[in-house]
Amino acid sequence: MFADLFAEDGRRSVPPMIVAVVMVLQRLEGLSNREAVERFAFDVRWKYAAGGLDLDHPGFVHTVLVDMRARPAASERPNRIFERTVQVAAQAGLAGRRRVLDSTPIYDAVATQDTVTLIRSAVRGLLRAADHVLRAELRAMISSADAYTDMAKPVIDWTDAAEREALVDSRAGDGYALPAVLDGRTLEQEVAQAARLPATVLGQDLEAGGEGGVLRIARKVAKDRVISTVDPEARHGHKSVSRSFDGYKGHIADDPDSEIITATVVSAGNVGDAGPAAELPADILSAPAETAPAEIRRAEVYGDAAYGTGPLPAEGDIISMVKVQPANAPGGRFSKDVFTIDLDAGQVTCPNRVSVEIRPQSDGGAVARFGAACVACPLAARCTTARDGRVITISPHEGHLARGRADSRDPDWLADYRATRPKVERKLAHMLRRRHGGRRARMRGRAKIDADFSLPAAAVNLARLGVLGVASTIHGSWTVATV
């Protein structure tokens, strides 16, 4: 299972099976690396779980766990431990044709940086990545008095607006000058990546203003703003309108009948839930043979309104049980549902029976503008207060959203949804209940965090398999033991 992670020659390593067991038990118990290796050294239950080892079996240093997590994360199968638990559940007949999706914030392991710190850190990273010859050439282009040798902020009067502007403008000048030196050159991958970061930071946080085009901090938040040069993939995210976080989102798919987690995905914190939703039910996307009964081919995917902003894949006879928020309008005016949207005819009809053409937009959506028709409309007061009349926005997934809103009004659909979807929240609570669980990232970078997020899922799955009485058979397969 781990042979591809190690060389055939070299010094002897700690058996990877033992380390893998410790990694899973570590997540089950919520322990730090040092606590986990100490538990393995002195707790007979851990040695039994690791293969019935002797009481005096030697332990290992905690850095072995760090190395073992890094090896799978850099491989072609980073989630192999978690995937093994899903295979066992499938062989035991515990992976059905229903999936429930949900997400949770994963707080990043770095501090969010302000604009000045971002610029200076990006410049320092470029100087650090360059060799000594290139570094000397880059330093010759620095026009400010900053040596960029430490993380400390320059000493200025931060209450003086003029001094703050001068600081930002001078550091921005360095940030633009250094990558310009490298324009058109063939660079090593590390240097090329480091050179892109200053340009990204400067473009998202600064704008020209004042006399002489002085660069100032932009009074806005860029759409995909880099929040740290230490972890450039971390992003600002929102769990709700009033609750924000910095880092990533962890998504899981859960079988609501057996309560086995079947898939995990980690995305940036600012990515909507509908994007990763296509990856989560991947194990049921492949439809069985066409001769199979309809009840076997049928698959259901449940999710809250966060997953209802786009369509789930329709392959494999998947039935979307994802909730879609009802349309609304401020002040009790006509909502979007009151308008008749005919996608085939390409027009929208308002409550006053006026039809206008649907015009496509560059983002893949479309709009219907009623404009002058609203001026003399007797229902205008109940529809809009906009000077240019009512505008109906058409989503790229409008047909899917309309069907979802209609389903959400069906009492039978709602009863099934309310009985099934909340089960995944309990499973997320099991994963994240420990101090050293999955709530705060233990490393940096989406790929590493993705691999690490699957470990508490594997631990929770193993605990669930034990509760369900799953046992191996003489043929090497797995089954649910009966008493």
Image (tube, helix red, strand yellow):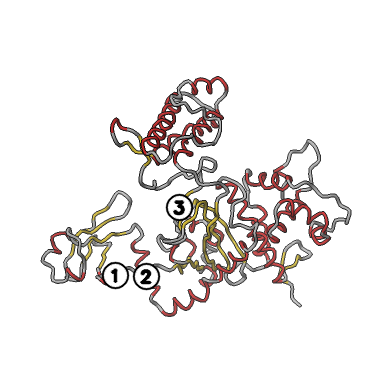
In the rendering, at what x and y percent does residue 194 appear?
51, 33
| Mark 2 surroundings within 10 Å by alpha-carbon count, few (fewer than 14), some (14 through 19), many (20 or more) | some
Three-letter code, disc 3: Asn
Q: Residue 405 carries which label?
A: 2
Quadrant of the rendered structure where residue 320 is? bottom left
Q: Give me the C-alpha separation between circle 2 and circle 1.
A: 9 Å
Residue in the image at 53% along x and 57% along y: 105
In front: label 3 or label 1? 3
Q: Do the residues labelled 2 and 1 touch (CB within 8 Å)?
A: yes
Badge 2 marks a residue whose secondary structure is: helix
Residue to which mark 3 is pinned: 270
Question: Can residue 184 be seen in the rendering of this structure?
Answer: no
Q: Residue 337 carries which label?
A: 1
Residue 248 left/right relative to 347: right
Give the camera-side residue of 233 and 16: 233
In the rendering, at what x and y percent does residue 189 appear?
54, 31
Q: Are marks 3 and 1 in contact (CB under 8 Å)?
A: no
Looking at marks 2 and 1 on the same chain, the residue that comes earlier in the sequence is marked by 1
| Mark 3 surroundings within 10 Å by alpha-carbon count, few (fewer than 14), some (14 through 19), many (20 or more) | many
| Mark 1 surroundings within 10 Å by alpha-carbon count, few (fewer than 14), some (14 through 19), many (20 or more) | some
Three-letter code, disc 1: Asp
